[in-house]
Image (cartoon, grey):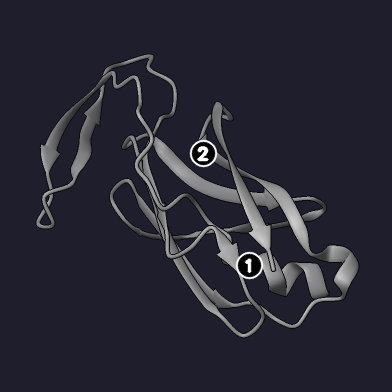
Amino acid sequence: MIVRGALSLALAAACLFPSQRSAAQDLNAAGVMVATHVIPGAGPQILAMSISDLAFRPGETVTGHVETSSNVTAVEIHVGLWGMTLQHAGHGYFEGTGRIPHLPFFLKGRWTMHVVAKTANGQKTERDLSIRLL
């Protein structure tokens, strides 16, 4: 599907999002705060998101990652009817990469990207991000 390929890397924002952290945290090797453990009963949390760009052009390679609390087992992104699961690359770290295909004119414009973090027992949290297909 055109939309699937086009948005497969429209991951998260080129900024850090503030979060309400209820997890103990440490600095990873890159100096980024990551959760080391979660207080019992705490829900999933999206601690940070980054993406290579917020405006996507055909042929562009897009990369991004999402950092979460340690109780998150999956992160999905959804734009319109398209969605994908990010690769679990480490403790509380999920990432994705892909190339934006050429799109018909009617798919271009502003979209809302929904980033959803889920735990094994079905709890979830979501962050939304405005993106643009050029």
Residue type pointed to by label 1: Ser
Look at the numbered disc 2 and give the secondary structure of its residue. Answer: strand
Front position in the image: 45 or 56: 56
Neighbor class of circle 1 (other Cα within 10 Å; few <14, some 14-19, many 20+) is: many
Image location (x, y in percent) of residue 8: 63, 67
Residue drawn at (29%, 22%), measured in percent from left and top?
Answer: 21
In the displayed structure image, the side of residue 103 where residue 52 appears, left or right: left
Q: Which residue is mark 2?
A: 117
Residue at 59% from the left image edge and 30% from the top image edge:
122
Instruction: Name the mark on residue 100.
Output: none
Q: Position of residue 67 (x, y in %)?
A: 34, 46
Quadrant (top left/top right/bottom left/bottom right) for the N terminus: bottom right
Foreground pick, 34 / 50: 50
Q: Which residue is mark 1?
A: 8
Q: Position of residue 92 (x, y in %)?
A: 32, 46
The amino acid type found where label 2 is placed reads: Ala
Which numbered disc, 2 or 1, marks the residue closer to the eye?
Answer: 1
Q: Residue at x 67, y 65 (%)?
A: 7
For the residue pair 126 and 44, the one nearer the viewer reads as: 126
**72 vs 122: above or below:** below
Q: Residue farthest to the right?
A: 106
Please state if 38 lies on the left or on the right of 73 as rendered. Answer: left
Disc 1 secondary structure class: loop
State which quadrant residue 6 falls in. bottom right
